Image (tube, rainbow, N blue to C red):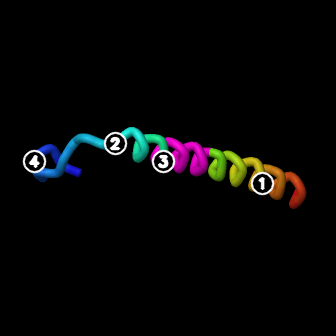
Amino acid sequence: VMNDDKLTTLICSSCVKNINKWHNYRETCLKSQEKLQRWLSKQAE
């Protein structure tokens, strides 16, 4: 998204909630993946 692309900069509250849910889900997945990789590394030692 660029400042001059003529797209709207507004977003409805329902969409904001969905984006926040997906963001939180992604963060949870990334943290879980990190923990799993650390655990697997320790098991390989």
Q: Main secondary structure of the magenta part?
A: helix
The quadrant where residue 24 appears: top right
Q: Residue at x 34, y 42 (%)?
A: 12
Q: Earlier in the sequence, mark 2 or mark 4?
A: 4
Distance from disc 3 to disc 2, alpha carbons, whole Å, reads 10 Å
Q: Residue furthest bottom?
A: 44
Disc 1, disc 2: CB below 8 Å?
A: no
Above or below: residue 9 compared with residue 43: above
Residue type pointed to by label 3: Asn
Identify the amino acid type marked 4.
Asp
Residue that mark 2 sits on: 12
Residue placed under numbered mark 1 in the picture: 36
Numbered range of the magenta stretch = 18-27
- Which comes before the other along the chain, label 3 or label 4? 4
> Residue 8: where, in percent of width, then height?
19, 47
Q: Amino acid at mark 1?
A: Leu
Residue 18, numbered circle: 3
Crowding around mark 1 (Cα neighbors within 10 Å: few <14, some 14 to 19, many 20+) is: few
Kindly report the distance in space between the C-alpha atoms of the residues bearing marks 1 and 2.
Answer: 36 Å
> Which numbered disc, 1 or 2, marks the residue that appears first in the sequence?
2
* Mark positioned earlier in the residue sequence (3 or 1): 3
